[in-house]
Image (cartoon, rainbow, N blue to C red):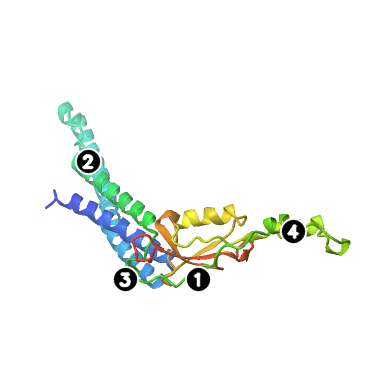
Amino acid sequence: MKFVVPYLRVVAGMFAAITLWLAIVEVVNGNLADAILFVAFAAGLGYLAIGKPLRDRRRRIKAEQDAIAARAEVGQRAFLAGDVRAAMAPPPKPPRIRRGVVIAAAVAGLIVLMGIIGDISDGLDSPTKDDASTTPRAAAPTTTTPYTTSAATTARTVAPETTPATRVSTTQVAAVASTAVMPNVVCMDLQAAQDTIQAAGVFYSTSVDATGQGRAQVWDRNWVVVDQTPSAGASIDEGDPVLSVLKEDEFSGC
């Protein structure tokens, strides 16, 4: 049984790390009650994996120190009695760390790291809402209107002035030309949609989870735009574009 115990502690430590990561994911998704439950579970596993061994180690070190002190006293008495061989006997060797336990701990750490990377690439979905997140959901209807002629083109195609009253000032043309037009980004991945909006002249846009679960879009290329506000062709300013998104492996109608 003593041979298996270190490996069981490695397994407990692995599950403690996984449970703690799930608690962090729940905090990101706003589920504090589930996060507290995961933290409590992780604390129990962490005690079995680390806390109890550290306590046992402190007890063992104290026992070894007491044994060394007693041995030193016995050696001194043997030396005074003339038994030099008993007085110079070497102390017992400390226990060695088994290589198999170290390898098992490294493998467990690698498994946890791969799981964390996979969760981040999937968008940090809440583990307590997997059923809701994997249910197919039809994309919200999107009204797409043709692109309107840009203000700069309109300004360039104004008919030649015929009277002073119809003259358009340079300042007015520049003000109209600076207005950005919302492009059609539906069915693009979120990163491409953001790039397209920035190319149109607006550098700040917002993305929201179309399922209403409030999932964070950590990896933009893993999300697909299913609806946009305002519709294509509308004039926009910084912060106006709002993009509703679903994960790329969910039904989006694109």
Mark whose residue sits in front, 4 or 3: 4
Label 2 close to label 3 by CB (< 8 Å): no
**Mark linked to residue 20:** none
**Mark linked to residue 158:** 4
Per the image, the residue denoted by label 3 is 135
Label 1 close to label 4 by CB (< 8 Å): no
Mark whose residue sits in front, 2 or 3: 3
Quadrant in the picture for the C terminus: bottom left
Give the residue type that dot 2 points to: Ile
Q: Residue at point 18% right, 26% down?
A: 84
Ranked by sequence position, the earlier of labels 1 and 4 is 1
Disc 3, SS: loop
Per the image, the residue denoted by label 2 is 97
Disc 1, SS: loop
Per the image, the residue denoted by label 1 is 143
Q: Quadrant of residue 183?
A: bottom right
Disc 4, SS: loop
Residue 53 at x, y = what percent? 26, 52
Ranked by sequence position, the earlier of labels 2 and 4 is 2
Q: Quadrant of residue 180?
A: bottom right
Mark whose residue sits in front, 3 or 1: 1
Residue 88 against residue 121 in the figure, above or below: above
Q: Nearer the viewer, residue 151 or 58?
A: 151
Q: Quadrant of residue 148?
A: bottom right
Ranked by sequence position, the earlier of labels 2 and 3 is 2
Residue 190 at x, y = what percent? 46, 58
Categorize mark 2 by other alpha carbons within 10 Å: few (<14), some (14-19), many (20+). few
Ranked by sequence position, the earlier of labels 4 and 3 is 3
Q: Residue at point 35% right, 62% down?
A: 22
Q: Nearer the viewer, residue 177 or 99?
A: 177
Mark whose residue sits in front, 2 or 4: 4
